[in-house]
Image: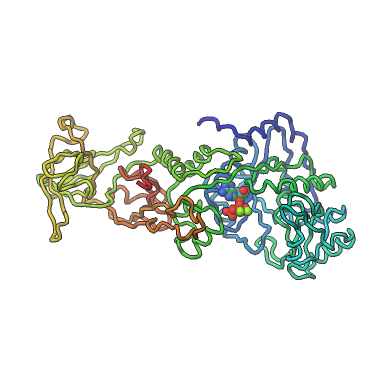
Amino acid sequence: ANAPATNFIRNIIDADLAAGKHAQRHWSGQPGLAKQQLDGELDAAKIRTRFPPEPNGYLHFGHAKSICLNFGLARDYGGRCHLRFDDTNPEKEEKEYVDSIVDAVRWLGFSWGDGDETNLYYASNYFDWMVACAEYLIEAGLAYVDSQNAEEMRANRGTLTEAGKDSPYRSRTPEENLELFRRMQSGEFADGAHILRAKIDMASPNINLRDPAIYRIRHATHHNTGDKWCVYPMYTFAHPIEDALENITHSICTLEFEDQRPFYDWLLDHLAAGGLLQRPVPQQIEFSRLNLTYVVLSKRKLIQLVEEKHVSGWDDPRMPTLVGARRRGYTPDGFHLFAERIGVSKADSLIDYALFEDCMREVLNETAERRVAVLDPLKLIIDNYPEGAREDCFAPNHPLKPELGKRAMPFGRELWIEREDFMETPSKGYHRLYPGNMARLRYGFVVKCVGCDKDADGKVVAVHCEYMPDSKSGTPGADNYKVKGNLHWVSAADAYPTEVRLYDRLFSNPAPGSGGRDFLDDLNPHSIERITAQLEPALKSAKPDERFQFERHGYFVADRVDSKDGAPVFNRTVTLKDSWGK
Ligand code: ATP
Ligand code: MG
Ligand code: MG
């Protein structure tokens, strides 16, 4: 593979490594933390990144960009990347999501903790230390308990053009604040009665520095810490501390956190000054998030699609989730290629879904074995082929990889061909079957069409032809026939009929919900079509998740959920060419 293209984040890392920025850091350890949070010196050659999902939903294609970026940097620089659950919101988080995130990251081909698969990180493991940090800020006069209600707080926050107003509780002494914060922790107050805020500057032009909330009261059971806590840290307070405790060197996040960076730096700087964290503290770096046409990449909207049953679940093959991608037949390598192609920058952009599909095609073209499937079957009868006779034709499993060998395809008197491969009255330029015309049955014989049978409504129900016995592919006589049409086929007596789902884009609008519409109004009513196709017999033994190119049609995968042993059903991953809108 080629060396990865450089980008502004790699430039920052290269400069830090050249300057030996992290070389001197030696983690001395903090009381009350498990060993995994104390692990290790950071030598000059190593960086640490993290992927910090909140376990409140399934991962989507946008997360894949972040995973490939963070785990990819750690891999390329010989560092490490932590999979960390940012689980500071007790109400919304569930173990089911934790498990699915672990599966998704692993599916993308990454591991964590220097190969120790059990080495997962949880923000909630640091709650003790976060409380200690908060109490330190209180004692240093850098935080106070505010007892305004939510409405008063909002009104006093000010606007972009107007400075905020100091809370009447802002002048509480450190002693008062510490006592109140301890009582918050002991469960004395109801949710929302008080809140702990950093004491910075209510007149700051950056609203995020106008005394941001850092701890709130929530009487809720947490998936990891149970009922131990009734105060929980705010994300903007918790995240920098998590990064610092884990010795993260480069904390990479999406652009909407750019305005939070001054608080990130403020907090870590004060906590390091107080001896609660080690220097150098982590550096936050923002990049632009993935936006993709024809899909939605917001958890809120994805949850709505599932809950309102517009799709069959999180793993519906039309969903832009990683569990959906897997069922759809998209490949981890395709995601890696896509991440590399779109690159990393600070410029907002909207990526065309066709680029994503091209990456998947490129990988599948290399890796997927070829098979034959007739999706819209029409009977072809070879009048001069002996009834009941059978012979094998041989088809290469991969045209670019002869080492993958050939497989036998039974040939007989009655075959299935595609309905569109016959025209009673041919249009201009049509070279396939029509009365009097010759075409090749790929890997088999040249046939000459002699007519067709119709039902009472005039619909063609069978096509008749005669075959040329000396024209078999791979024999010397094959070259005697120059024909333009080249059709695929499956022996009717041997075919495996099964369900095939033809998926298309979930939304018919490149920007679902744009122009003030409800995004649900942009759902594509034709995003799934279920057909019964006739497949070559070798496909009957396909294993769940096995991927193939169905010649002339596209890439398909044996559905990992609905396939039975010896009875797979198939999902179309992507067509051979981009045919959207044509
Ligand atoms: P959503 O906005 O869809 O709810 P989120 O950002 O809240 O997603 P998290 O679980 O907090 O979801 O995300 C984990 C990581 O994935 C974060 O570091 C976040 O920056 C990154 N991420 C989320 N969405 C995208 C995206 N569209 N492109 C790139 N990175 C993303
Ligand atoms: Mg988030
Ligand atoms: Mg978000």
219, above or below 157, in the image: below
Q: In the rendered view, does 213 fall on the left or right side of 138?
A: left
227, above or below 118, in the image: below
**Which image quadrant is residue 480 in?**
top left
Q: Position of residue 528 (x, y in %)?
A: 38, 56
Q: Position of residue 90 (x, y in %)?
A: 66, 62
Q: Is residue 197 visible?
A: yes
Q: Is residue 317 visible?
A: no
**Which image quadrant is residue 65 in?**
top right
Query: For this rendering, which residue is in front, 322 or 405?
Result: 322
Q: In the rendered view, does 326 fall on the left or right side of 42?
A: left
Q: Residue furthest front?
A: 161
30, above or below 166, in the image: above
Query: For this rendering, which residue is in front, 407 or 176?
Result: 176
Q: Position of residue 427 (x, y in %)?
A: 19, 43
Q: In the rendered view, does 335 fall on the left or right side of 220?
A: left
Q: Residue at x 74, y 49 (%)?
A: 206
Q: Residue at x 57, y 51 (%)?
A: 102
**Which image quadrant is residue 162 in?**
bottom right
Q: Residue at x 84, y 63 (%)?
A: 168
Query: For this rendering, which residue is in front, 32 or 20?
Result: 20
**Numbered circles on residues, count:** 0
Q: Position of residue 270 (x, y in %)?
A: 82, 47
The scheme the figure's colours follow is rainbow
